[in-house]
Image (cartoon, rainbow, N blue to C red):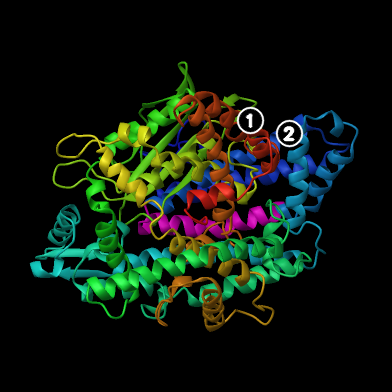
Amino acid sequence: MSNPLLHLQALPDFDAIRPAHVAPAIRALIEENRALIARLTAEPGTPDWDGFVAPLTEAGERLGRAWGVVGHLHSVKDIPEWREAYNQMLPEVSRFYAEVGQNLALYNKYKALADGPAFAALSPVRRRIVEHELRDFRLSGAELPDELKPRFQAIQEELSQLAAKFSENLLDATNAHAEYVREEAGVAGIPADALEAARAAAERDGQAGWKFTLQMPSYLPVLQYADDRGLRERMYRAYATRASEAGKPEWDNGPLIGRILALRDEQARMLGYRNFAELSLVPKMADSPAEVLAFLRELAAKAKPFAERDLAELRTFAREELGLPELEPWDIAWASEKLRVKRYDYSDQEVKQYFPEPKVLDGLFGVIRALYGVDILPDEAPRWDPDTRFFRIERNGHTLGHFYLDLHARETKRSGAWMDSARSRYRGSAGLSTPVAYLVCNFPGPVGGKPATFTHDDVLTLFHEAGHGLHHLLTQVDELAVSGIHGVEWDAVELPSQFMENFCWEWDVLSAMSAHVDTGEPLPRALYDKMIAAKNFQSGMQTVRQLEFAMFDLRLHSELDARSGPVPIDAVLRLLDEVRREVAVIFPPVWHRFPHSFSHIFAGGYAAGYYSYKWAEVLSADAFEAFEEAAAQRGSVLDRSTGERFLNEILAVGGSRPALESFKAFRGRKPRVDALLRHSGMVAA
């Protein structure tokens, strides 16, 4: 009774939860669910919602919430004890969910409900949930012959373990490398705040000079600003070869990639699909891999000429102004920053001084208040790290939800930025549970007694994750399976997040959320104008880079033959080269090992779905155009009436209806690519 993972009706007690609690709690919750399923499937007669779906949902939610806490701690506090606790239970959890997905008796109960007379009387939302359940049973192998089900279950178990191992290898390889610089000449060009953090890191190791790591807040300033070309090259090579054969054999993700691809292919073929991409697209908006590939190629055809122009300009500048006859990959960020400064007379580092963390958060919360009429206020709850903060979101004094904010990089925290659910909105037997979210980033922390300062890219990332959070927190759907982000097609789930990024380019937003870290002065209008002029600087290169990732992912899961066993890493790299020849303008060295760190598709949920970012950009740019139209009439993109419509038609409805219907309800038509091309500066002059 004292196990805090068994008592999550309120908020997780992070002060009390220990790795030793994981196995007993998760096993008890699995057994609770197994017993309930056995009882419900044994009952005679046609099931109904209240006696069948509702109790299954509540028991599943208790397990899902507890396991979610464990998975979250594995991501943000990856110390050996938590890694061991997570990995110990991962096979058992995977096995249970595979069993549920293949439980023919349970599947038949859902079919009986769908075929029964009471189905027509259910609300459209509940009918949609039942239809999704039937689809997911089929995708989980419920209709497979009994002799094939053990193999399908074993595949799912192994895939979950391989994904966890992929992520752990990448974290360990990232943390393993450090560059110590002793001479001041070796750090020329690197901004003062990055140097201060690097000196503090070296001191913690008992070393003189500066320590640079492959964590983003340390790595990026070196690549972008360090004048020492040798340092840039060493850091680039270390970063580009993480978790590959160039490092410790036990951290090499190459064999894992081959095995993951083979298992996914086998899984898809067992279900009657030609490849994993076809399987992956079943619950998405897109109909087929061919349709997605055509979308990516159409966008690439429009973007590549702009990318080629961007690169030609950079090479000419590097040769004529920087004395670099040959532009190497580790020169690109550095030379690009020099070109931006020369062309637009400002640098990222200059802008960064105007975005101290407290002011940015106030600005973000102000945008949310203006658009949706909600307030975000500090609150108290147990946390997993002292650096983490906790907030509640409310309207007219009524609490809508809460979220944790974990902004700064740590060695025990996986890289990247993400939003995840701690609890979803759900009306059950105990009443209404309000949603709770985790918002996690990896920004630089405070140094030298000053608040942390954010680059404009950091601000974009924060707004992006906040968009995911709002999708989760502002839902008005009471059914767990389609509340918030649940049940939303994967290629539409990035719409609210990428939509929020657009506000980071608006003067009335940026001016209100800026204050120079030393003087308190707001962002000067002249500097903002330079940022806008430079907004689409190298947008062609950035676009084709994302298209390269998306096309590689899609073709990887639809074209490589994995029927004979693990896919050789050489075949994976050859396909990547082929994709680059079609869409890329920058070609990394032969020793570059990008796939080995492509966590989105090998350790996340984006396998055969990375294209979602580009598709959602189309949706988000088109949606934001409605706010631009409102601004033309009423003077500001922070238009409350348009915000209310976006809230009601997109955020509040979650997955309770198809994403395309939600978009059309907001815009009055299907999405168009025009706004994205205009926002990216990729239209004919």
Q: Read off the residue under disc 2.
A: 125
225 or 4: nearer the viewer: 225
Asked if 644 appears above or below 407 in the picture, the reply is: above
186 sits left or right of 8 in the view? left
Q: Range of the magenta residues?
A: 77-100
95 in magenta: yes
191 sits left or right of 94 in the view? left
Q: Residue at x 52, y 47 (%)?
A: 67
Q: Verify CB contact (< 8 Å) between mark 1 and mark 2.
A: yes
What label sits on residue 302 in the rendered view? none
Q: Residue furthest top?
A: 396
Neighbourhood count class around disc 2 (C-alpha, 10 Å): few under 14, some 14–19, many 20 upward? some
What label sits on residue 477 in the rendered view? 1
Badge 1 amino acid: Val
Tell me which secondary structure the magenta stretch mostly adopts: helix
Residue 345 spot, x, y in % from top left: 24, 53
91 or 236: nearer the viewer: 236
